[in-house]
Image (cartoon, helix red, strand yellow):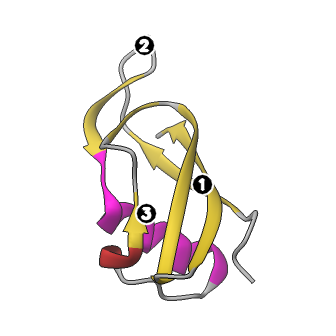
Amino acid sequence: GLSGTTVVVAARAADEGRLFGSIGARDVSEAIAKYTGITVPPELIRLAGPIKEIGLHQVIVRPHAEVEIQLVLDVIPA
């Protein structure tokens, strides 16, 4: 399954690792599909907030109320 999977997203970033934009649930959804072939609608993806930095970020997928799947999002410079 998805649990514990690391999904990589490349994003444009400044030298110090700040992203020019931010990564939201839709971007995470696309990355999960690309890396795993599993379609996760953006509305099931829980982020602590918009992702604005290079590095590892915890992402939670909530397919339903009792189920919580943790993923790692690895944001790399594009």
Q: Which residue is mark 1?
A: 8
**Residue found at x 36% / y 19%:** 14
**Residue found at x 60% / y 54%:** 8
Residue 27 location in percent, x, y? 36, 62
Q: Which residue is mark 3?
A: 28
**Residue found at x 33% / y 75%:** 42
Q: Earlier in the sequence, mark 2 or mark 1?
A: 1
**Placement of the N terminus among the 4 image quadrants:** bottom right
Q: Is residue 26 left or right of residue 1?
A: left
Tell me the CA gap for discs 1 and 3. 9 Å
Q: Earlier in the sequence, mark 1 or mark 3?
A: 1
Q: Which residues are magenta?
A: 23-36
Q: Which mark is residue 15?
A: 2
Q: Are marks 2 and 1 in contact (CB under 8 Å)?
A: no
Front residue of 48 and 41: 48
Say which amino acid is labelled 1: Val
**Residue found at x 33% / y 63%:** 25
Q: Are marks 1 and 3 in contact (CB under 8 Å)?
A: no
Q: Secondary structure at mark 2?
A: loop
